[in-house]
Amino acid sequence: MPRRKIAVIGVGKIAQDQHLPVIEKGEDFELAALVSQRGVGHGGVPVFSTPTELYAAMPEIGLVAICTPPGVRHELALEAINAGKDVLLEKPPSTTISEFDDLCQKATRKGRLLFQTWHSRENAAVDRARDILAAEGVARLRIDWRESVRKWHPGQDWVWEPGGFGVFDPGINALSILTQILPFPVFVEGALLRYPANRQTPVDVEIAFRTGEPHRPEISAHFNWLETEGEVWTISIETSAGRRLALEKGGTVLRIDGEVALEAPSEEYERIYDRFADRLDAGQSETDDRPLRLVADAMMLGRRETVAAFDW
Amino acid sequence: MPRRKIAVIGVGKIAQDQHLPVIEKGEDFELAALVSQRGVGHGGVPVFSTPTELYAAMPEIGLVAICTPPGVRHELALEAINAGKDVLLEKPPSTTISEFDDLCQKATRKGRLLFQTWHSRENAAVDRARDILAAEGVARLRIDWRESVRKWHPGQDWVWEPGGFGVFDPGINALSILTQILPFPVFVEGALLRYPANRQTPVDVEIAFRTGEPHRPEISAHFNWLETEGEVWTISIETSAGRRLALEKGGTVLRIDGEVALEAPSEEYERIYDRFADRLDAGQSETDDRPLRLVADAMMLGRRETVAAFDW
């Protein structure tokens, strides 16, 4: 089968670190063009300043991967759908729930395929944890997600602006794993949102979840963006059968009762593009707004606290 | 056709002001029982302390109207659906998007009917405005929704607590009209949320909306909860044909180019129960989360400002 031609829109860090190399080394896709306002090129393919120019010049390209910052993704995805393209969207797929729902509806109406990259789910350890929880049930689950914003987003003031998500930017990865592994729906019961005095997005978030399950499992999360020495991306679980699981290092390692049960090299974007290819074969979208909804729910229900100002 | 037996769960102000008298004076429903933790009765019908007792004692009642505060509606609606009841939910139907989506899915799966009361939509002037905008298009639209929280919610501290919605409590009524009359989807572009220094929900909100429409209509809203002298619940519109519409008094009056074109006595809850009966005849749910989503979007995207403390 010939490779499918794909264009990447937005050639920033995530495109360069993941999308471009993964597209090139796989066998399903052919990188056919780029759209970059700043004219960033790669691999000698044509570079356009706008998607409109791309669609006019190379109508044979049927797929786009949108890797811009989230604020403009809705508009770009709509334009792509209207131009008859199938669309892969970086996470988070949009800055509001209404935008994402709109894209899902429009894609369906136009017969186009939509796919979003909740990359942290794409790990064998996550699959295994999901299977165990389906079999054994969940008694307790705790998310600890603490990293250094200075290390991962040095000087990027936009993460602190409205729509920049703050510590929900890493936190939504944990929520994408949570919604993938739990065998039942989960709801925000309450949240505590700590905002630096001089910033518009939270630096530290605690969430208490509830479920509709009669045995009332205890589920909670803590996200922090000022951790320097002990960065951690762990989900600790006690199953109803009494086993202790720990998904560590962002979902790449699974411990069972303290012993490493599964540790695989991270191939999150390889899996994303594999499944995108499968979905294209099947002609079926994959859209899941649950992680984004939980963020919206936490921000709607959260108690706000002001903490020390943040400066780089 | 015999009247359908209905139970009202939560016998507070909105139940007493609207649901109970409207059920009694109409011909479609028969008030058959109440659920009130505090034992509030009405019309001599049986009063239960919990829905569980109601469902056990009077299984012949197939419908419930849930009129409690929003925080517990999800749990009560789930219990009702699981007990095989069709459900009418006061607005807002839940405190989070995830809860409302869950109810929609569960109702569908269980073959039960779900209906929510966006009451401000239920006015002839709103219908007429929607028809005019469908024919003439929208160039500009402005929502001004200013009222006195001291007058409408005297001493009710819960409106200022997380999940209490603050000035979004009246504002969501405007959003329920907005999403009803616009002939295209609308998205939050940005928002300014003003929080009293000692409170957890906003007292004043400005929202800028965007659309996917090529002519870029200007749409904005201002909600304020400290208005005393000049309370106003108005949506002012300029159509693309140049006519000026004003929906006034919360959607009950329509002016066209300054002249009153339609003014009908408010029969919002009568219309709600009429349409609930129609939906039951048709066996079809009516669920629309767009007003709630726009609130969540504004709170997720909004810039926060602290303003003077609020005390009653």
Image (spheres, coloured by chain):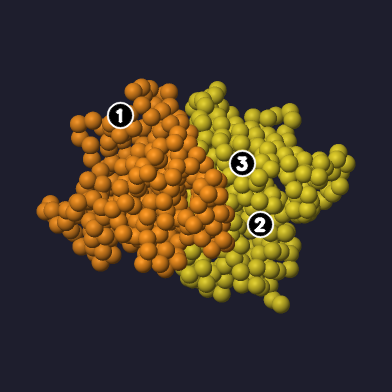
Chain colours: A orange, B yellow
Q: Quadrant of the C terminus of chain A?
A: top left
Q: Marks 1 and 2: CB-CB under 8 Å?
A: no
Q: Which residue is mark 1?
A: A150
Camera-side residue: B255 or A3?
A: A3
Chain ID at mark 2? B
Instruction: Determine the CA span between mark 1 and mark 2.
Output: 55 Å
Residue B71: x and y in percent read 49, 49
Q: Label 1 sits on what residue type?
A: Arg
Q: Is residue B120 left or right of residue A178?
A: right
Q: Secondary structure at mark 1?
A: helix
Q: Which residue is mark 2?
A: B19
The residue under the point 51% across, 66% down is B107
Q: Secondary structure at mark 3?
A: strand
The residue under the point 51% across, 60% down is A112
Q: Quadrant of residue B28?
A: bottom right
Camera-side residue: B93 or B66?
A: B93
Residue A296: x and y in percent read 46, 45
Q: Label 2 sits on what residue type?
A: His
Q: Give the label, 1 or 2, closer to the camera.
A: 1
**Residue B199 in view (yes/no):** yes
Q: Secondary structure at mark 2?
A: helix
Residue B210's label in the rendered image is 3
Chain ID at mark 3? B
Question: Are callouts 1 and 2 both on one chain?
Answer: no
Instruction: Determine the CA span between mark 3 and mark 2.
Output: 36 Å
Is residue A1 depicted above or below A163 in this figure? Answer: below
Tell which circle, 3 or 2, labels the residue nearer the N-terminal end: 2
The residue under the point 13% across, 53% down is A260
Residue B38: x and y in percent read 53, 52
Q: Is residue A115 left or right of residue B228?
A: left
Residue B14: x and y in percent read 63, 50
